[in-house]
Amino acid sequence: MQERITSMTTLELRRIPPFSTLFPVKENVLKKITGDMKVNGYDCAHPIIVWAGNRCKVIDGNTRLEAALKAGMNTIPVVLKEFKTEDEALQYAIKSQSNRRNLTDSELLNCLTELDKRKDKNANLKQNRTEAPSGASGKTAQNTADLLGVSTRKVERIRAVNEHAPTHIKNAVVAGKMSVNKAYNETMETRRREAEAEISESPEQVKDKRKEAIVKSIGGMLHTRLEREIQEYPEIRYSQSEIEVIGDQVRSLVTESIKLLPIETDIQNN
């Protein structure tokens, strides 16, 4: 990977997800850095990391960039780095932060969510992925733990919360109001109670719950993907006819994918 140091105007640099949302800017830290920049100028020992040749995306240094803008700076030092893929750039951003400090539980959840999104898109990784019911194990989990600067046990617990926690628990972790350990324990207790309740439910009641869960899950994934599209390409506008065409294509893909669900046979119906 090659890199070179240069300077760029602050208005050239683009803060785009997932890099801009991985580590939310803390107001107290931002205020402190902004105040220092107003007095001492930009510390060139800490340049902004930019993805070379990729639309000036900021990979690491969003807080410093925000502080520079608030301090009224027009030009700041940057390091242009080359990355082969977004996955590689994402891992670099996470490792840079975990090497400098201990990540909060909220940040760990954000990072693992982004990392797992990319693993699930890769069919080969998906086939080779070895997981216990509550999370990943083996080499994959160890690599993730090393990247995040935590234990494999912590990775397993974060992943369990991400995959199984009710929305209010997950939101509490994201907001920094609940630790991963507490969220994990409450999630496992909730799942235990649900499993006990399902024993007394009829097959039709279980099916109704699963149908609701499938629709909710697909809707959530679609909403997240469209939100990211808007954030990454805010300058693009679509006509009503183009939106309708995209909608028809998405419906067709969903309809085809739903056929993967097992169909009742005549024997089962009888």
Image (spheres, grey):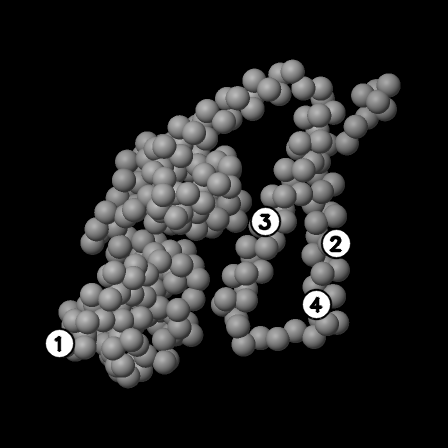
As drawn, the label of residue 252 is 2
| Tag 4: amino acid | Ile
Note whether residue 70 is visible: yes
Instruction: Please identify, in this view, whether the residue under mark 2 or under mark 4 is nearer the observer.
Output: 4
> Where in the figure is residue 57, as x and y percent of width and height?
39, 70
Residue at which label 3 appears: 220
**Relative to 85, is 180 above or below?**
above
Of labels 2 and 1, earlier in sequence is 1
- Residue 117 relative to residue 94: left or right: right
| Image quarter hosting the N terminus | bottom left
> Where in the figure is residue 24, as x and y percent of width and height?
35, 58
Towards the viewer: 146 or 63:
63
Q: Residues within 10 Å of mark 4 (few under 14, many from 20)?
A: few
Residue at 34% across / 38% down in the picture? 179
Of labels 3 and 1, earlier in sequence is 1
Residue at which label 1 appears: 40
| Tag 2: amino acid | Ser
Which element carries disc 4, helix, strand or loop? helix
Q: Residues within 10 Å of mark 2 (few under 14, many from 20)?
A: few
Towards the viewer: 140 or 264:
264
| Tag 3: amino acid | Gly
> Where in the figure is residue 182, as x and y percent of width and height?
36, 32
Report the Cα–Cα distance between label 2 and label 1.
58 Å
Report the Cα–Cα distance between label 3 and label 1.
46 Å
As drawn, the label of residue 243 is 4
- Residue 131 relative to residue 234: left or right: left
